[in-house]
Amino acid sequence: MKLLLGLAIGTAIGAVMQLGGASSYRKILGALLLKDMTIIKLILTTIAVTTVGIYALDLVHMAHMDVKPTYVVGIAIAGLIFGVGFALSGYCPGTCVLASAEGKSDAFVTLIGGLVGAALYALVYPFMGTLLNMTNYGEITLASVFNVTNGIWIAIPFSAILLLLVFKVLKDRYE
Amino acid sequence: MQDNPVLSPKVAGLLLGLLVILATALVKPFGVSTQYVVTDALVLHKTAPTLAESNKYIAKYGEKEDWGVGYGWMLVFGMFLGSGVAAVATHRFRQRKDAAMSEMWTAQFGNHKAKRLVQAFIGGMLLLFGARFAGGCTSGHMISGISQLAVGSFVFGIAIFISGIITAKLLYRKRAGS
């Protein structure tokens, strides 16, 4: 049952992301070159909607939250590595799956590279202890840091700022 | 242009947001990169069981009983299907002469397919190494993590855009004499 649910939600997510242009090399590089705002607007709109939705669910205790631990230095280094891969491949771990389904062979090669990269991480994992434990503040959120009981009071203004960026501030800059 | 998206980013973002909310209500927030380890674990448990069992990271995934193919793996498989169906339905499947080469890429680097594929492979390795190190990727950290207001996910999001923008600018810097 859960397998079918995963398949159904995944299929809808894949279709929406493909139709939104998330699997396009040109759109992703356009975003990183700060010329094409399509992907940035897509991500920010998604976050704006999801943040309010999740914290509204949380009010009625219906959100299955899964907050990842914050190990600042390790995550920052990991993000810097990820960013280089993002610009080199023009995909991320999800969008290369989408683009592979469109028949783009560079995306399929990125996916294979990803399987190798994940295996390499598994190999070095036993030596990562320091970086994973250093500056580790655990599963903290803005709500817990600012001691706000109902995160919705942060979620609403946060989402409003993101939507303002999407609708009013961000503009494509093709010269 | 032929690969302009069918949906505007606002509409796609709204729909994607609603789907992530649905997933969080029913099961858990949405994430992709874990499934790369699950897939590695599936293959390794089958081909090199001793190695798979001895590795602390791999041993956590892909148990012999169900081979680790659970909700999350089916979700990513669904993404593959959904994207394929959407691309075919909107006549965007393999419309370029060579689907590995974006025109944007060939304009900068020339028509060198092998070079593009090497770049894509190295990029993929860095993506998943970074994502597993951070504990999530664009979906798990950027979308699901920031939407839960997780502090680490903000750190990840800022870091990937800093290095992504610098790398992209270096790759696409104007060449002398062009």
Image (cartoon, rainbow, N blue to C red):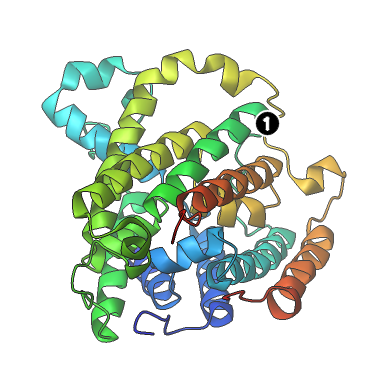
Q: Disc 1: which chain?
A: A
Quarter-of-image position of residue A113: top left
Q: Quadrant of the C terminus of chain A?
A: bottom right
- Position of A111 with respect to A143 (left or right) is left
Quarter-of-image position of residue B151: top right
Whole-percent x and y of residue B134? 53, 35
Name above or below for residue B20 compared with residue A20: above
Q: Residue at x 26, y 43 (%)?
A: B118
> Which element type, helix, strand or loop, lies under badge 1?
helix
For disc 1, the marked residue is A72
Q: Amino acid at mark 1?
A: Val
Whole-percent x and y of residue A166? 68, 74
In the image, A11 versus A169, the foreground residue is A169
- Position of B150 with respect to B136 (left or right) is right
Q: Residue at x 25, y 47 (%)?
A: B115
In the image, B25 versus B142, the foreground residue is B142
Mark 1, residues whose alpha carbon is within 10 Å: few (<14), some, or many (≥20)? many
Q: Is residue A124 visible?
A: yes
Whole-percent x and y of residue B137? 49, 47
In the image, A89 versus A151, the foreground residue is A89
Whole-percent x and y of residue B61? 33, 32
Of all residues shown, which one is farthest toward the right?
A: A147
